[in-house]
Amino acid sequence: MALRKKILEMLSRGEIDVTRATELLTHAQDAAPDTAPEPPAPPEALDPAPPIPVPSASAPPAPEPPLALDRRRWLHIQVSALDTGHSRLRVNVPLGLVRFGMQIGARFTDELDRSTIGDVLRAIEQEEISGTLLDVEDVSDNERVHIYID
């Protein structure tokens, strides 16, 4: 458990990206014994930098660099008062974190079909999903909920 926490802390501090965190969490899950608690990992065991590839004649093309900050996409959740329009709640989540959460969450539930999760993840990555996903007005509670991706 301590190893998972350390990996997630590294992700939140920006020391590693979502892909690297997923790899480390997968490795931690595979390496953990079923009955014994996880021993604390020394800091040097969590190398946040991936190994440097050695170029060769048959090397595959380099992966695309991460999106610039102005090109990153976000999931926005806003709750506001209907009569005044004043914001009561605003939550902005990077889509990279949404993908990461869906990948991890898919391992722990049988309620969602894995092909559905895969379809949603592909749509997010290929930028097929954008704009308003949900816009609901609750007159009895005087609230408007607006969920969208940009």
Image (spheres, rainbow, N blue to C red):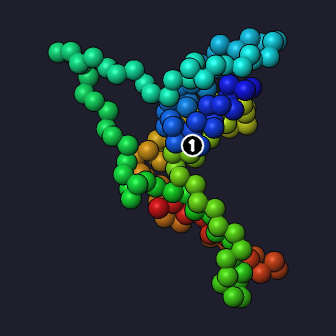
In terms of secondary structure, where does tag 1 sit? loop
Question: To which quarter of the image does residue 41 belong?
Answer: top right
Q: Amino acid at mark 1?
A: Arg
x then y, percent, for residue 104: 63, 34
Q: What residue does disc 1 label?
A: 13
- The answer to whether 70 is drawn above or below residue 61 in the figure is below
Question: Where residue 40 sits: x, y (%)?
Answer: 72, 19
Q: Residue furthest left?
A: 57
Is 47 on the left-hand or right-hand side of 104? left
Kindly indicate the quadrant of the structure image that contains residue 79: bottom right
Q: Nearer the viewer, residue 103 or 10?
A: 10
141 relative to 13, above or below: below
Q: Is residue 114 visible?
A: no
Q: Residue furthest bottom?
A: 83
Can you give x and y, in whole percent of width and height, for residue 13 in the image?
Answer: 57, 43
59 relative position to 70: left or right: left
The residue located at (17%, 15%) in the rendering is 57
Question: In the image, what residue occupies the spot 58% across and 36% down?
Answer: 10
Q: Is residue 43 above or below residue 150?
A: above
Q: Nearer the viewer, residue 118 or 39?
A: 39
